[in-house]
Amino acid sequence: MAKKFDATLKTLLEGSPPDWPALADRPADEVEVIDANVSTVSGAADKVLRVRGTPDSIMHFDFQAGPDASLPRRTHGYNALLEDRHELLVRSVVVLLRPEANLSAINGTYKRQFPREKPYLTFEYQVIRVWEVPVERLLSGGPGTLALAPISAVRAKDLPTGIRRMKERLSGHRREEAARFWTSAYVLMGLRYEQTLTDRLFQEVLGMEESVTYQAIVAKGLEQGLEQGLERGAIDEARKLLLRLGQKRFGATAPARARKAAEAIGDLERLEELNEAVMTAPSWEALLGLPASRSRRRKSDG
C-alpha cells in the first residue's frame, strides 16, 4: 500500500483505537495500540491492537489499496509472529480500500497443501471491503473510522451530504484535531475521486474555514516528506527485528562485527530478505556474508 495511505490510516487508528474492532464487528471497551515491530518482515506497516477481555487478544489490521496476491501469505506470517511475540490469540483483519485490491485469492482463507494431500495449514482471516460498508454505519460510528465514509458504499451525489454530516460530527473537536481528520479524509478520497472533485466538495461544504489549499499542502507532505520519514523508520525497525530474530536463532546477541554490518545496511528490501533468511542461516557470519571468526576457523581447522 502506498505510504501516504498507510500514514493516514495509522493516524486514524491511533487516534481512536476502539473504533476499529467495532468496524470488524468485534466491539471492545478497552483497546490499546501496541508495537507492531514484526511488520517489517514483509515491508508493510501493520496496525496492531491489544484487546482487553476474556481472554485478552491481539487484533492485527492490514490495509491494502492495490492488488497483492501475497497478502494472504503475509497476513498468516504476521499472525504467527504476533502470537509468538505476545503469546496471545491473534485475530487478523484485512481491510481492502478499493476494488482494485479485491483479488480472488483474498477470500478469508489461506491454505497450504502438497498435491493430492489434505491441507497441512488452514488459516482464516477477516476481510473488510470498504466500498461495501454502508455509509450510514460509518457516519454514525466512531471518529476513528469516520474518514472512510466517502470511500464506502456511498453514491457520488450523496457525497456533499456525507461530508456535511462529517463536519457536524467534528463540531466539538479542537481545531488541530479537526485539521488532522480532514487531512486524512482528503488523502483517502484520493483512492476513488479526482483531486478536482475532492477540492470542490471540500470548498463547497467546509468553506474557507477549512482551507482546501492547506489540505492539499498537507496531503502533498504526506506523499513526499512523510514517505521519506516512514522509509527511514521502516529500515530502523527492520534492522531491530533482524537482530532480535538472530538472537533467537543463534542463541546469543549479535557480536559487534555482525551488529556493525547490520547497521551498515540501508536498503529496506535487503533487510527484509535477511529477516526471512535468518530462520535457516547457520550463523551470523553466513547470514551477513562475513568471514568466519578466528575461533570458528580454528575449530574447523582442527
Image: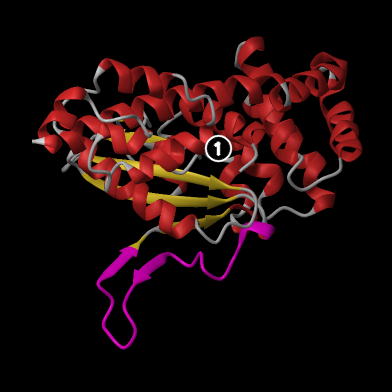
The quadrant of the rendering that contains the C terminus is top left
How far across and down, in percent of the image, does residue 282 sit?
A: 23, 43
The answer to whether residue 33 is visible is no
Picture residue at 49% right of the left edge, 26% below the top: 235
Residue in the foreground of this view, choosing between 89 and 212: 89
**Image position of 208 (left or right of 89):** right
Residue in the foreground of this view, choosing between 122 and 198: 122
Picture residue at 48% right of the left edge, 52% below the top: 94
**Image position of 182 (left or right of 109):** right
- The residue wearing badge 1 is 145
How far across and down, in percent of the image, does residue 86 sit?
A: 21, 36
Residue in the foreground of this view, choosing between 109 and 291: 291
| Label 1 Cα neighbours within 10 Å, binned few <14 / some 14-19 / many ≥20 | many
Picture residue at 48% right of the left edge, 25% below the top: 265
**Image position of 42 (left or right of 181):** left
Picture residue at 58% right of the left edge, 44% below the top: 138
- Furthest residue toward top: 175
Hey, which quadrant is residue 33 in on the image?
top left
Q: Which residues are magenta?
A: 100-123
